[in-house]
Amino acid sequence: KVGEQEANNITRKATHRGTDAHTLIEEYLNNSDTFSDVLPLSQYLFKQAKPDLNRIDNILCQETALYSTELGIAGSVDCIAEFDGELSVIDFKTSAKPKKREWIEDYCLQLAAYAMAHNILFNTQITKGVIMMCSKDNYYQEFVIEGDDFDHWRKQWWMRVEQYYLSM
């Protein structure tokens, strides 16, 4: 609706904002004494999430490549750590506006895929995923998949893979 050039500009700003917020979160979780110089909006988004970042403990990895030839996937996971005392895949997101649960299906699929890959690579039993999302209008959201919900997304992921190969 806004034209290609403006759409590209919006995408570039959103990507930059997300990368900066990720950087601050990673530095915070690494107990850094200094933080990168980022745009004020990125600092603002980070400050929204900061109280809930303290629920993360015993970090196994951050911004780490995960792959599985068995699953046929590769990607970079934001964080694998204990969240509220349970080993979890944690994904940090920024957004222009708050999201409804039904709008983030791909994020849930991503959490399930990363959990399965980590479980295969490192013989873990991750069955929980957490999306920590901050939006520009000062709204923090948290989406958790676990238990039956996690099983649902794992099955949905396998169905998506099957559909992909059937379409080839």
Image (cartoon, rainbow, N blue to C red):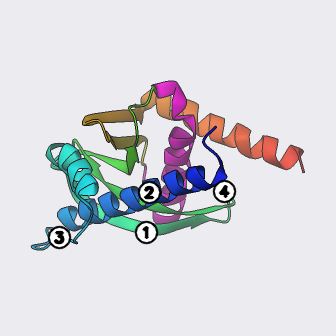
Magenta stretch: includes residue 20: no
First of labels 3, 1 by sequence position: 3
Observer-side mark, 2 or 3, equals: 2
**Residue 5, x across and y down, in percent:** 61, 55
Quarter of the view holding residue 61: bottom left
Give the crowd class for mark 1: few <14, some 14-19, many >=20 residues within 10 Å. Answer: few
- In the image, which disc is placed on residue 13? 2
First of labels 3, 4 by sequence position: 3
**Which of the pair 122/141 is nearer the observer?**
141
Quarter of the view holding residue 128: top left
Instruction: Check disc 2 and report its element: helix, strand or loop.
Output: helix
Q: How many marks?
A: 4
Observer-side mark, 2 or 1, equals: 2
The residues bearing labels 2 and 4 have C-alpha atoms spaced at a distance of 33 Å
* Three-letter code for the amino acid on which mark 4 is drawn: Leu
The residues bearing labels 3 and 4 have C-alpha atoms spaced at a distance of 37 Å
- In the image, which disc is placed on residue 35? 3
First of labels 2, 1 by sequence position: 2
Observer-side mark, 3 or 4, equals: 3
Highlighted range, magenta: 101-125
* Three-letter code for the amino acid on which mark 3 is drawn: Phe
Q: Quadrant of the N terminus?
A: top right
**Vertical placement of residue 160 versus 72, above or below:** above
**Residue 145, x across and y down, in percent:** 42, 34
Instruction: Check disc 1 and report its element: helix, strand or loop.
Output: strand
- In the image, which disc is placed on residue 64? 1
**Residue 109, x across and y down, in percent:** 56, 42
**Residue assigned mark 4:** 71
Q: Do we see residue 123 in this rendering?
A: no
* Three-letter code for the amino acid on which mark 1 is drawn: Thr
Observer-side mark, 3 or 1, equals: 3
The residues bearing labels 2 and 3 have C-alpha atoms spaced at a distance of 20 Å
